[in-house]
Amino acid sequence: MKGLRVLGIILVLPAALYALPSHAVCFYPHSSLSGYHIPLKSEIETSSAIITGKVLHVQYVPPDPDEPDGVNSYLYTVERLQELKGHLPPHVLLYATNDSGGYRMRLGEIDLLFLTPLGSRFTADVCGNSTELPKGEYVVSEVRKLLGQSGAQP
């Protein structure tokens, strides 16, 4: 009886862990401690663009067969709704790896995105302040305040 209980735990535990959403491992600079979150002021300064955008298309990208440690990823086509910093076209491509370091989104989702160029695409740091809206509306307000903007739509 005890053996069956242990076997059940062994079989169920991996499935339960697999079902949990992945969380980023964000290390503090110059440290091996995790739990770091990029300060908002710092990310505003270092981001080339900050927008709110709606995910119009999600494309799965399989790993490159020539890369031995290739990682699958996603390309998101995002419609720019508001431009808080920078100048971007109406639609941008956001690249995200399918691991704990990729900022992933769902079709139709609207997010506040702190963008860094990656060739002709952009990335958003999962350890930063990018967030789904409306949950992150307070972050939009703080960004506007720090950039000296009014709340009016661009």
Image (cartoon, rainbow, N blue to C red):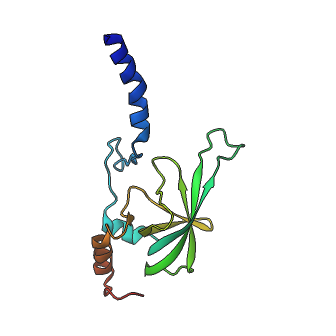
Q: In which quarter of the image is the C terminus?
A: bottom left
* Furthest residue in direction right, as rendered: 66
Relative to 136, residue 19 above or below: above
Q: How many labels, in total?
A: 0
* Furthest residue in direction front, as rendered: 1
Q: Quadrant of the N terminus?
A: top left
Q: In which quarter of the image is residue 95?
A: bottom right
The answer to which of 7 and 35 lies nearer the viewer is 7
Residue at 38% x, 65% y is 132
Relative to 54, residue 103 above or below: above
Q: Can residue 50 be seen from the camera position used here?
A: no
Residue at 39% x, 71% y is 45
Q: Where is residue 65 in the image (x, y as percent from the top left)?
A: 71, 43
Q: Where is residue 53 in the image (x, y as percent from the top left)?
A: 47, 73
Q: Position of residue 110 (x, y in %)?
A: 43, 70
Residue at 36% x, 47% y is 27
* Left or right: residue 72 compared with residue 131: right
Q: In which quarter of the image is residue 119?
A: bottom right
* Left or right: residue 151 compared with residue 103: left
Residue at 38% x, 21% y is 8
Q: Can residue 82 be seen from the camera position used here?
A: yes
Q: Quadrant of residue 77?
A: bottom right
Relative to 144, residue 57 above or below: above
The answer to which of 18 and 142 lies nearer the viewer is 18
